[in-house]
Amino acid sequence: MKIDEQLSLISYSYQDSRHGQVVFDFQQGPSKSKFIHDIQTRLTNIDSKTIFGKGYLICYQEQIVGYFYLSPIKKERLEVEYALLKEAREKGYGKLFLTKISDYLLQKFPIKELYVTIDPSNEKSISVAEASSFFFDEEDYEKRGYQGLMTFVKENPTYQKGKSR
């Protein structure tokens, strides 16, 4: 799926040897996130007939820089999960990807809002979310006693319930 001239998404396929290396790199990496280490489950969930509930590799100028997963839509709210390979971090790919994919999804699908969840200690991911027009849902975090992951939300300004574009 081409997002723009430089950014594209590749649906996971066992036939492509690059996918196996990406899975290995994430599973063996230093991240504390269960999500990061559970990449195999997300990338191999290929039963979905839509883009939702599927894993994709993120490519920038045809180079794999990470992966992302779209949770199935629930009540017009969609979670975007993504991670960048270690060598692709701090190069602007996170902001570029999150901004482009969130704008694309909000324009193409009847989604009320997108959200990402971030570990409070991951300051760089928090900065990426904020720079990509996601706002911190402090009310949600307060309800959970300021425990666990922080939720950042991006609302669709043109959302109309039940209407697709």
Image: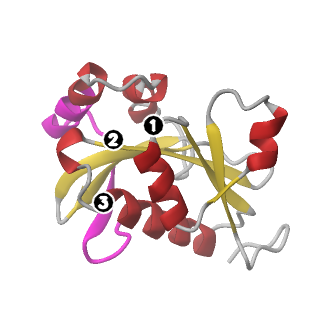
Residue 91 appears in the rendering? yes
- Percent x, y of residue 60: 23, 62
Query: Which of 15/6 is in front?
Result: 6
Q: Residue at x 79, y 42 (%)?
A: 140
Q: Find residue 12 and report its image quarter.
A: top left
Tell me the CA gap for discs 1 and 3: 25 Å
Amino acid at dot 3: Tyr
The residue to which callout 1 is attached is 46
User: Relative to residue 137, is residue 67 drawn left or right?
Assistant: left
> Mark 3–mark 2 contact, CB under 8 Å?
no
Percent across and percent down for residue 158 are: 74, 79
Q: Which residue is mark 3?
A: 93
For image coordinates 47% across by 28% down, the residue present is: 35
In the image, which residues are magenta? 1-23
Q: Residue 5 in magenta?
A: yes
Q: Position of residue 149 (x, y in %)?
A: 62, 33
Amino acid beneath label 1: Ile
The reply to whether residue 1 is in sight is no
Residue count near mark 3 (Cα–Cα under 10 Å), binned few <14, some 14–19, many ≥20 = some
For mark 1, does the 10 Å Cα neighbourhood hold few (<14), some (14 to 19), or many (20 or more) residues? Answer: some
Q: Secondary structure at mark 2?
A: loop
Name the image quarter holding the N terminus.
bottom left
Residues packed near mark 2 inside 10 Å, few (<14), some (14 to 19) or many (20 plus): many
- State the residue position of label 2: 12
Inter-mark Cα distance, 2 to 1: 8 Å
What's the residue type where badge 2 is placed?
Answer: Tyr
